[in-house]
Image (tube, grey):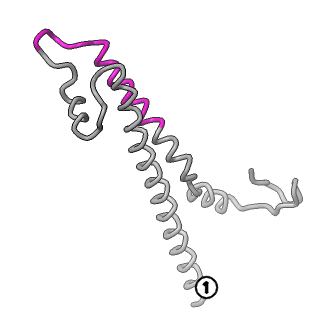
């Protein structure tokens, strides 16, 4: 990714260890990848939670998964069943994608502000 010596492939100049450290610490996040990862993680979690409750079942006289059943209020078509696990995975993937996207945008924005402040501080110190 980075050439350690001057005159290496591509004619890139050597980067100091400090520059490499700053570049790796403040790497820009891929927002779409964060959204995809959030969607996949949330969908898989919801699917596995629902299926595990369906397989395990409930004691006689009790409802299966009363806590997950609360999602029926917000997600039309969801139920604690095999079919409901697919519907729940779909809704969870939408929410996970939005949360992943927002996380990626927030990450990039905060790092932009921090790097901007560091550059301004450096210019201010050089002006003195």
Q: Nearer the viewer, residue 2 or 59?
A: 59
Give the image location of residue 46, x and y in percent.
36, 30
Image location of residue 28, percent across then percent down = 58, 57
Above or below residue 51? Residue 90 is below
| Residue position for label 1 | 126
| Left or right placement of residue 43 versus residue 49 in this view | right
Tag 1: Cα neighbours inside 10 Å, few (<14), some, or many (≥20)? few
Task: Locate residue 74, reporting x and y percent.
Answer: 25, 41
Queried whether the magenta region covers residue 53, the answer comes back as: yes
Q: 84 above or below 112? A: above
Q: Main secondary structure of the magenta part?
A: helix
| Residue closest to the eye, 66 or 90 | 90
Drawn side of residue 95 relative to residue 79, left or right = right
Q: Residue at x 30, y 16 (%)?
A: 54
Element on which disc 1 rests? helix
In this orientation, which residue lies closer to the viewer: 45 or 13? 45
**What are the residue bounds of the magenta stretch?**
40-61
The image quarter containing residue 77 is top left
118 in relation to 58, above or below: below
Residue at the extreme left:
61
Percent x, y for residue 65? Answer: 22, 23
């Amino acid at each position: 990714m980075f050439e350690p010596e001057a005159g290496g492939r591509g004619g890139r100049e050597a980067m100091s260890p400090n520059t490499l450290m700053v570049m790796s610490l403040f790497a820009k996040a891929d927002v779409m990848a964060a959204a995809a990862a959030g969607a996949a993680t949330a969908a898989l979690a919801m699917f596995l939670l629902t299926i595990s409750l369906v397989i395990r079942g409930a004691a006689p006289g009790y409802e299966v998964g009363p806590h997950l059943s609360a999602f029926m209020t917000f997600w039309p078509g969801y139920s604690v069943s095999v079919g409901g696990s697919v519907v729940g995975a779909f809704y969870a993937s939408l929410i996970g994608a939005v949360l992943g996207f927002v996380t990626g945008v927030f990450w990039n924005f905060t790092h932009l502000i921090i790097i901007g402040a560091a550059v301004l501080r450096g210019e201010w110190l050089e002006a003195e």
